């Protein structure tokens, strides 16, 4: 079995759970003897790291392009089905960097997942030697550049299945299905509805709807996501398979049990979807009765400046700390110091960070609007709109550290079977059914 | 015989803050230094080399060449003085040499270039006394003129300045204050008796401080003789023309390549060639004038930004939160000094420097460029986070030393 995997993040180049999930799944499949070629937009050190880990073969779109430039402006071509408006933009931009429709498609869409247009521009500036030679001029151009690179790969190698992760790689997945006749698996780690609710970008929703229609099989990271896809996209239930994210336990530094003030943690992208403002509201209420309590917000995102200002406005600037994005040892250190982890997501397809926290021995307080609750069926829950409930839970855990430790232990025990290898086995059976 | 006697009053403000370390959440409670002294040293040495030393030399030569007819005034913040003592002592010597000419007046301000005047009157007075003693010790004369941080003043501040024994206060010639009156008269402040207010002539000051190097400006490149002609044409008998500006204008904000130092070198002779234009220090100009009128100043006025108010330092929630949190520690910080930890009080006072909240400003418009030029941080939010981390750490330290040792 040889799988072409299309993704947008892969460790160490990732901004969230998507990359971690891709790594876990690809690693699990490798363990089952599946040959996987994973295409990510750019290298950024990923290739070497993954090779050293003995994981799947990681190919960067950049690498593909430099090996074999996709010459001419018609390689993708307008060969797709005509008359389908949802399809037109997938190919609209082929080479036509002056195509106004494609550019505008993303430039005015600052809330696109993982990287909005502004986030993309920020990333672009951060890259050493940043320039249009390597990266598309904007996110839309980058999606298109990536798609072309994948098609170039298909002309040289044969695969049994194509497996695309989230909307940015769906265009390439659909074209691979069409051009090479491969069975298509689309994997929803999140959907536009999760990210933006009723403010969804219709153009992105259209891509997701098209993928749901074309895919031979759709993997959902949770039952929560499966329901969303049926309810908001009219997806055909028979095509949808729930494969929860797995989790590989790893060693964490010992917990820091100091008599210092209690520390409550938010960890995630600072977008409305993740509910950081709910976290601040709760912090404000908790501080009223626990003036020493500390609240840490770890992560980056478009709401960052607003949240910083809001913490000041609420009068809790002395209690709230912002660290920016953390990973590796710094993240471990943070978790080791944390007394309570909160995931106040408004709509969370899965929420891997919750598993990370539980694995580190931290009790996790989860919003009911999250998929991860399906694999951690224990511990305090609240509806994201019910700040009062969250405040009651936090005060209880802060005031009763023994109870907090019990919750942490129970959640860790419940987590034990969440192994990636088992998840990968489910996916492999799916491939075998499709590749027949 | 000239019937005109107008004063041309140059006052230069020299200041450097102590910039903070990249103080993250993880640094709180560690022994990491709160201030980035490598960076502070690098900058003060650079500014000394580009601005303080060449300009001081140039001005001293101008004084000697005119037999003391060229005269000017300086205010040097205490945080700058300490940095010069530690890292650029030769540059400090050149300031002392200026004082020895007898043609240069050194003013008083708050020792830490702080906003204590609007936050904590007792700390304000303490910082003024600290600075007054230091200026007298360094330059041999007790200052008679006061300039508050960024020329911030209102009636309350003016009254306190008068009560502290100063004769003269510097202010911005803001339209909001003057409402059509001339900024070249010497005024009193409502509620004060004898304190004289000298105002900044912002058009003439900004010609040098901001427009000089602007190639888009219709008068670019500005020559010293042209500028002297302008002064000559516009000055009336009894006028006080306050040319108040950052000293770093010369060679740092505007590099020597712009010709700004040459401009200043040639200006004194051109001005003195005009009938009835006389350079005076702030105290001298103040002494020659009588109070035209007492002005009402209910709200603080400053020389910053278009608004000429406190909004550069205290407008958004971050600035207010940081400012309030800082001054909440005032008593603990002073108590620490009494309990054998003067270094903690000193560090707290370095945090009172107004630059720290200035970096947190989120006002946009034309002044955003000026703010961006001055900030060492990536964003106002980053500077707020750093400041609050440092403050959190300092607060914890202050709590631990609240009990006197052995008590």
Image (spheres, helix red, strand yellow):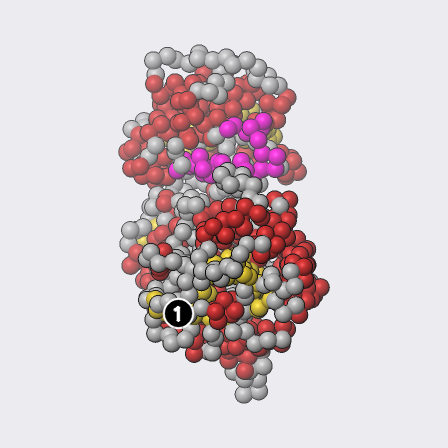
Instruction: Decide which of B214, B341 is in the foreground and name it.
Output: B214
Chain name for mark 1: B
Residue at position x 31%, y 30% in the image: A233
Instruction: Decide which of B56, A411 is in the foreground and name it.
Output: B56
Q: Can residue A40 be seen here? A: yes
On the image, the x and y values in percent for residue A320 come to 43, 60
Residue at position x 58%, y 34% in the image: A130
Eyeballing the image, is A230 above or below A17? above
Q: Which residues are magenta?
A: A111-137
Magenta span includes A133: yes
Crowd rating for badge 1 (residues with CA inside 10 Å; few <14, some 14–19, many 20+): some
Tell me the chief SS of the magenta region.
Answer: loop
Residue at position x 54%, y 73% in the image: B143
Asked where in the image residue B104 lies, by quadrant, the reply is bottom right
Task: Give the mark count.
Answer: 1
Taking the view exactly as shown, the residue that stands out farthest to the front is B1
Eyeballing the image, is B174 above or below B297? above
Instruction: Decide which of B101, B54 is in the foreground and name it.
Output: B101
On the image, the x and y values in percent for residue B171 come to 44, 63
Task: Provide the secondary structure element on which disc 1 rests.
Answer: loop
């Amino acid at each position: 079995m040889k799988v072409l995997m299309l993704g947008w993040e892969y460790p160490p180049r990732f901004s969230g759970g998507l990359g971690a999930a891709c790594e876990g799944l690809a690693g699990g499949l490798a363990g089952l003897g599946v040959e996987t070629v994973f295409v990510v937009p750019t290298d950024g050190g990923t290739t070497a790291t993954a090779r050293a880990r003995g994981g799947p073969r990681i190919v960067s779109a950049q690498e593909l392009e430099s090996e074999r430039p996709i010459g001419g402006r018609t390689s993708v071509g307008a060969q797709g089905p005509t008359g389908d408006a949802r399809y037109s933009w997938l190919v609209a931009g082929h080479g036509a960097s002056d195509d106004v429709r494609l550019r505008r498609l993303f430039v005015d869409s600052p809330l696109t997942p993982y990287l909005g247009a502004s986030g993309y521009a920020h990333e672009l500036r951060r890259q050493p030697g940043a320039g249009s030679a390597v990266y598309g001029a904007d996110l839309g151009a980058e999606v298109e550049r990536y798609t072309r690179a994948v098609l170039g790969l298909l002309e040289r190698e044969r695969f049994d299945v194509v497996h695309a992760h989230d909307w940015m790689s769906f265009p390439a997945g659909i074209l691979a299905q069409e051009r090479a006749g491969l069975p298509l698996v689309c994997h929803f780690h999140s959907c536009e509805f999760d990210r933006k609710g009723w403010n969804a970008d219709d153009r992105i929703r259209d891509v997701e709807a098209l993928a749901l229609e074309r895919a031979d099989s759709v993997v959902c990271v949770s039952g929560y996501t499966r329901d969303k896809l049926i309810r908001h996209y009219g997806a055909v239930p028979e095509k949808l398979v729930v494969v929860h994210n797995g989790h590989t336990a790893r060693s964490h530094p010992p917990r820091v049990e100091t008599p210092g003030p209690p520390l409550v943690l938010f960890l995630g992208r600072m977008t409305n979807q993740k509910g950081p403002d709910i976290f601040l509201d709760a912090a404000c209420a908790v501080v009223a009765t626990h003036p020493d309590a500390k609240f840490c917000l770890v992560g980056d995102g478009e709401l960052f400046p607003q949240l910083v200002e809001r913490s000041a406005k609420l009068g809790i600037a002395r209690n709230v700390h912002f660290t920016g994005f953390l990973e590796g040892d710094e993240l471990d250190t943070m978790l080791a110091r944390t007394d309570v982890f909160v995931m106040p997501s408004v709509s969370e397809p899965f929420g891997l960070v919750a598993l990370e926290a539980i694995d580190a021995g931290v009790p996790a307080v989860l919003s009911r609007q999250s998929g991860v609750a399906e694999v951690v069926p224990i511990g305090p829950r609240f509806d994201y709109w019910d700040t009062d409930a969250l405040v009651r839970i936090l005060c209880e855990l802060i005031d009763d550290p023994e109870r907090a430790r019990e919750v942490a232990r129970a959640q860790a025990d419940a987590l034990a079977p969440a192994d990636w290898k088992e998840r990968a086995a489910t996916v492999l059976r799916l491939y075998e059914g499709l590749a027949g | 015989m000239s019937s005109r006697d107008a004063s041309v009053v140059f006052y230069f403000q020299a200041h450097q803050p102590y910039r903070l370390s990249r103080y993250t959440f993880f640094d709180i409670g560690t022994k990491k230094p709160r201030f980035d002294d490598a960076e502070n040293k690098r900058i003060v040495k650079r500014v000394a080399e580009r601005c303080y030393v060449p300009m001081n030399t140039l001005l001293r030569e101008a004084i000697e060449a005119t037999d003391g007819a060229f005269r000017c005034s300086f205010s040097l913040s205490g945080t700058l003085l300490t940095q010069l003592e530690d890292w650029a002592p030769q540059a400090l010597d050149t300031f002392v040499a200026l004082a020895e000419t007898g043609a240069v007046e050194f003013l008083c301000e708050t020792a830490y270039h702080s906003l204590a005047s609007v936050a904590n009157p007792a700390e304000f007075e303490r910082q003024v006394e600290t600075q007054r003693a230091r200026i007298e010790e360094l330059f041999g004369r007790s200052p008679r003129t006061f300039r508050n941080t960024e020329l911030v003043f209102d009636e309350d501040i003016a009254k306190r300045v008068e009560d502290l024994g100063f004769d003269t206060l510097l202010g911005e010639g803001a339209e909001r204050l003057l409402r059509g009156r001339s900024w070249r008269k010497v005024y009193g402040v409502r509620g004060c008796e004898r304190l004289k207010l000298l105002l900044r002539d912002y058009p003439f000051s900004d010609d040098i401080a901001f427009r000089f190097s602007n190639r888009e400006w219709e008068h670019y490149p500005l020559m010293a003789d042209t500028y002297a002609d302008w002064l000559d044409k516009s000055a009336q008998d009894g006028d006080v023309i306050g040319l108040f500006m950052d000293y770093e204008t010369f060679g740092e904000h505007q590099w020597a390549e712009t010709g700004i130092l040459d401009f200043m070198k040639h200006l004194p002779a051109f001005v003195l060639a005009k009938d009835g234009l006389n350079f005076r220090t702030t105290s001298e100009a103040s002494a020659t004038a009588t109070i035209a009128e007492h002005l009402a100043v209910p709200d603080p006025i400053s020389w910053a930004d278009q608004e000429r108010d406190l909004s550069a330092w205290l407008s958004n929630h971050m600035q207010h939160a940081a400012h309030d949190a800082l001054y909440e520690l005032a008593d603990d910080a002073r108590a620490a000094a009494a309990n054998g930890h003067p270094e903690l009080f000193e560090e707290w006072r370095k945090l009172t420097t107004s630059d720290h909240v200035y970096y947190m400003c989120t006002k946009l418009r034309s002044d955003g460029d000026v703010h961006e030029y001055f900030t060492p941080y990536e964003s106002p939010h980053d500077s707020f986070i750093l400041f609050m981390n440092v403050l959190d750490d300092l607060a914890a330290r202050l709590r631990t030393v609240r009990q006197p040792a052995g008590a």
